Image: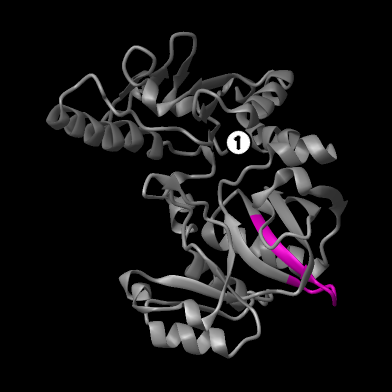
Amino acid sequence: MTEERPVLVATEVDDPTADRVITHLNRRHVPVVRFNLADIGDGLTVSARYGTRSAHEAGRVLTPTRTARLDDVRSVYWRRPTWPTFHHLGPDDARFASAQTRHGLGGVLRALDGALWVNHPALNAEADYKPQQLALAQRLGLAVPPTLVTNDPADAREFVAAHSEVIYKTLRLTSYQRDGVPLAPWAEPVTAREIDDRVRVAPHLFQVRVNKVCDVRVLIVGREVFAVRIDSGLLDWRRDYSALTYSVVTLPAQVEKGLIAFLDTFGLASGSFDLAVDRDGSHWFLELNPNGQWGWLEEQTGLPMAAAFADLLAQGGTP
């Protein structure tokens, strides 16, 4: 029966956002099996059989308190699980165990047939390339600031000099230190004079700065759209959350349609978009985070985001 089919929640140990969704699933009396990939061993057991037609041999996922038959899983909430590091093993054994876990445990989960994924890790990874995002947004008719991705210093200088204000942004959020000091990946203004041959080392993203009046973070869950205006006066609002104020807004119909089509193109059930709104009211596409944070926005606005995730996961896929 559908009511008995569990939802798998794969996430790290301390994840208040997943806790919110699980609370709503519990209220709906939906069975939940929560685990972290790093729990493999005593905290997580997986067993799957192939080449057999016997339903009871399909396989199971077991935690110390929960069990789920693989062919019964209705949906998978792939939040922020972490892979095991096997620190108790030697380097070669740890490398071997890591590879077997990624392709064994990861492969078993990816092979789930008929379950709804929010979102499948392969689809998250596919959607996580900013140049691909920008190209798709442009094809869908969304406004995209003029952007250059290059490792050619001459092209970069020419692009920056041709526009009054340009910012540099990382192509992917990456932990980074220089001389032991952590460097934050904020968007930063850049001038042509600052560009030198170090640009050749790797591709860089340069983008014309939107003369914005505010930012908008948009969370889409299935077909539910939650749009929150963020006022800060900051170029990159992530720098100082204490400086932010929030208000619920409604997107222009064409923008909302374009963002839903964006997720559909990648086969994603959910995603978080960042937009900038200029003085003319135009909404400029900046980026998609396929697995972005949203819990703090629910706290600030009261929007029923966790409930929307619970509804989607409870609906699940075809048994």
Quadrant of res 160: bottom right
User: Is 278 contained in the magenta span?
Assistant: yes
Q: Is residue 13 magenta?
A: no
Tell me the residue that label 1 is attached to.
316
Q: Which residues are magenta?
A: 273-283
The x, y position of residue 281, in whole percent, is 84, 73
Q: Residue at x 48, y 57 (%)?
A: 128
Q: Tell me residue 82's x, y (percent).
A: 42, 32
In the image, is 240 to the left or to the right of 12?
right
Residue 304 visible at all: no
Q: Main secondary structure of the magenta part?
A: strand
Comparing 94 with 33, the one in front is 94
Q: Is residue 108 left or right of residue 315?
A: left
| 130 or 255: nearer the viewer | 130
- Report the residue at 62% width, 26% height from top: 2
Q: How dense is the environment of label 1, judged by Cα within 10 Å: few (below 14), some, or many (20 and up)?
A: many
Figure check: 288 above or below 90: below
Q: Residue 55 vs residue 248: left or right?
A: left
Please tell me which residue is depicted at 23% across the width and 36% down the height of the picture: 99
Q: Residue at x 39, y 14 (%)?
A: 43
Task: Pick whichever, 76 or 288, lies toward us.
Answer: 288
Q: Is residue 2 above or below residue 156?
A: above
Q: Amino acid at mark 1?
A: Gly
Question: In the orientation shown, which residue stands out farthest toward the top?
Answer: 65
